[in-house]
Image (cartoon, rainbow, N blue to C red):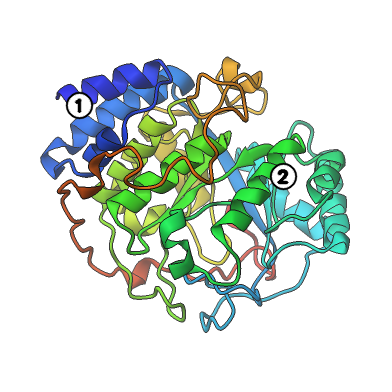
Amino acid sequence: MDLLNTLVDKGLRREPPTRDEALAVLATSDDDLLDVVAAAGRVRRHWFGRRVKLNYLVNLKSGLCPEDCSYCSQRLGSTAGILKYTWLKPDEASEAAAAGLAGGAKRVCLVASGRGPTDRDVDRVSETIRTIKERNEGVEVCACLGLLSDGQAERLRAAGADAYNHNLNTSEGTYADITTTHTYADRVDTVHRAHAAGLSPCSGLIAGMGESDEDLVDVVFALRELDPDSVPVNFLIPFEGTPLAKEWNLTPQRCLRILAMVRFVCPDVEVRVAGGREVHLRTLQPLALHLANSVFLGDYLTSEGQAGKADLEMIADAGFVVEGAEEVTLPEHRAAGAGGCGSHTERGAGPDPEQGCRAHEDGGACGAAVSAPRESEARTDLVAVRRRGPGTDLAPNA
């Protein structure tokens, strides 16, 4: 297929596809799916070999969020029966992190619900970061605390944080349909703050919220311009008790096409298959490893993942290897800070991320005919609320 040959050549040169080409990936048929995976897999292996980076989530504070993000089980007004608890103490968080590290994770992601941290919250998390780093040599720590205000990113960096996660989630054009208590621009601002403070920026998306192909391409091109080092690709977990509980729009094949499109747009970036992979990829999870070079081990924030042992067996059976703590995840040119998300420019150069990735701007394929995703059977049996790990007396899944 000429399209795939073109995309591979561009990916190996760190050159972005056009919007038309990105949309065309999403429009490929199931008959072409393995060809798409193989092509994107060539790009993934060129930049990351067969290494898979393992990440482990620790939910520092669960539930009772004042924001109204429609996808979130912790949102204002959610009736999902999730765990609710206030801040874990540093020792508790460190013990939870140790379980993931023992399972092979090299990065611990510290997450707390809420609009954004107070200065006192930053103090709490800073103490937790220091505790984890003192007990685990070489561990990477990523914080995810919501919207940041002046000086907070710098304080987290000084405490030893390596990265900061704040996802764009969806396109600018549809953002207000998903969340009303903050804006898309607020999210972009926080990613910029983290980047400016020297934290490795981590920002991604959620697929399956009823968005169009054009929306998916918009948000991925916007992420490219933001220049994150890692891009988590989440697939909506439709929790009962949230506004999007009935949004079952994904098939395993659709998920793989989305991951392939992200890899072609951001060829040399850590692409992480994140929340919802068990629910939506199901038995095709191993194929995602040919596209993404990073996964979460074990459970997520408020839902349970498959057993950590099963994750490790899947990686080995698919012919991949777990990335060691001593290995550098990113390609040399990115690790040195020379360029981002496939770009040939210095960080911060290029179009304004607030302006550069809107639909129709390049006269491209926004009006082109694309195949609608096939509706997926609702698999509510696969949505399991987390009942172990932080906030409980049971051992975590790692």
Q: Nearer the viewer, mark 1 or mark 2?
A: 2
- Residue at 47 percent of width and 40 percent of height: 356
Label placed on residue 3: 1
Residue 224's x, y, as percent? 49, 36
Label placed on residue 23: none
Determine the image quadrant of residue 161. Answer: top right
Say if 379 sits above or below 287 in the image: below
Say if 220 sits above or below 251 in the image: above
- Residue at 60 percent of width and 42 percent of height: 202
* Residue on which disc 2 sits: 193
Q: What amino acid type should be assigned to the residue bearing mark 1? A: Leu
Disc 1 is placed on an element classified as: helix
Say if 18 sits above or below 332 in the image: below
Q: Residues within 10 Å of mark 1 (few under 14, many from 20)?
A: some
Determine the image quadrant of residue 124. Answer: bottom right
Q: Distance between the residues labelled 1 and 2?
A: 37 Å
- Residue at 20 percent of width and 34 percent of height: 34
- Residue at 32 percent of width and 53 percent of height: 282
Say if 7 sits above or below 109 in the image: above
| Chain-order first, disc 1 or disc 2 | 1
Q: Residues within 10 Å of mark 2 (few under 14, many from 20)?
A: many
Kindly tell me whether residue 170 is visible in this rendering.
no
Marks 1 and 2 in Cβ contact (< 8 Å): no
Q: Which image quarter holds the N terminus?
A: top left
Residue 186's x, y, as percent? 63, 57
Residue 92's x, y, as percent? 79, 60
Disc 2 is placed on an element classified as: helix
Kindly tell me whether residue 247 is visible in this rendering.
yes
Of 356 and 299, the residue lying toward us = 356
Q: What amino acid type should be assigned to the residue bearing mark 2? A: Arg
Residue 73's x, y, as percent? 53, 72
